[in-house]
Image: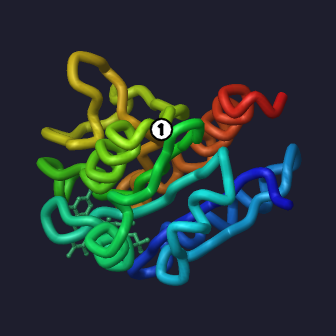
Amino acid sequence: MSKIALIYGSDTGVTEEIANEIVSDWTLTDIEVIEVLNASKSDFERFDKIIIGLSTWYYGDLQSDWEDYFDEEFHEIDFTGRTIAFFGLGDQYGYGEYFIDGVGILAEVVRKNGGKIIGKWSTKDYDYEKSKAKIEGEELFYGLALDEDNEPEKTPERLKQWLSQIEEEFELK
Ligand SMILES: Cc1cc2nc3c(=O)[nH]c(=O)nc-3n(C[C@H](O)[C@H](O)[C@H](O)COP(=O)(O)O)c2cc1C
């Protein structure tokens, strides 16, 4: 069995591309990639280590497949004993008041349902106004923020650093 699940949703393929990069960069363990479109509760509950990837759309909404799944059964997943890492795609200039909000929307449920969130990421290198993904009282997002619309050149280094961070926090190293 794979050790980690990577569950993602993507409207125009950007998050999907990052998911593929994570799989090709990762050498420490097997990853099973599942598009949320095809996911069910048991896919989350088969794993104790999960990476969740998503983009944000239309002024702070979840990516469309995540939105469907959120309404369907995301709330019912028991995250107790599970460790979750988020990465979110967004546009900090075009949608600066809603930057990667989707990460915050899902993280709230994961926390409420007993999950442990790792892979938190500094807000300092971004120029946005507001984000549901920002942890209150801290200079951290709940997960990695990537902005392929404005800063694609920063993505490889951000991704590399974050993968090294979560490898440690997932206790794979
Ligand atoms: C119409 C539209 C609405 C968007 N709304 C948001 C938003 O509210 N917050 C944000 O951070 N990014 C927003 N974005 C940026 C997307 O999240 C970004 O382009 C992302 O890379 C798309 O990834 P995907 O192809 O995996 O869905 C929006 C983009 C478009 C075209």
* Left-right relation of 140 to 101: right
Residue visible at 31% across and 78% down in the picture: 68
Left or right? Give the position of 126 relative to 163. left
Q: Residues within 10 Å of mark 1 (few under 14, many from 20)?
A: many
Q: Position of residue 167 (x, y in %)?
A: 73, 34
Q: Seen in the image, is 20 located left or right of residue 123? A: right
Q: Residue at x 44, y 56 (%)?
A: 77
Q: Which amino acid type is shown beneath numbered disc 1?
A: Gly
User: Residue, x 66% and y 45% (percent of image)?
Assistant: 49
11 w.r.t. 25: above or below: below
Q: To which quarter of the image does residue 32 belong?
A: bottom right
Judge whether 81 appears above or below 7 on screen. Answer: above
The residue depicted at 25 percent of the width and 51 percent of the height is: 101
Q: Quadrant of the C terminus?
A: top right
Q: How many marks?
A: 1
Q: Is residue 79 above or below residue 162?
A: below
Residue at disc 1, secondary structure:
loop
Q: Is residue 101 left or right of residue 10?
A: left
Q: Quadrant of the N terminus?
A: bottom right
Residue 46 appears at what percent x and percent y? 67, 59
- Judging by the rendered image, the residue that carries numbered circle 1 is 115
Indicate the position of residue 70 as horizontal and vertical percent values.
Answer: 31, 67
Q: Closest to the observer: 12 or 108? A: 108
Q: Is mark 1 within 8 Å of ligand 1?
A: no
The one nearer the camera, 69 or 9, is 69
Quadrant holding ligand 1? bottom left
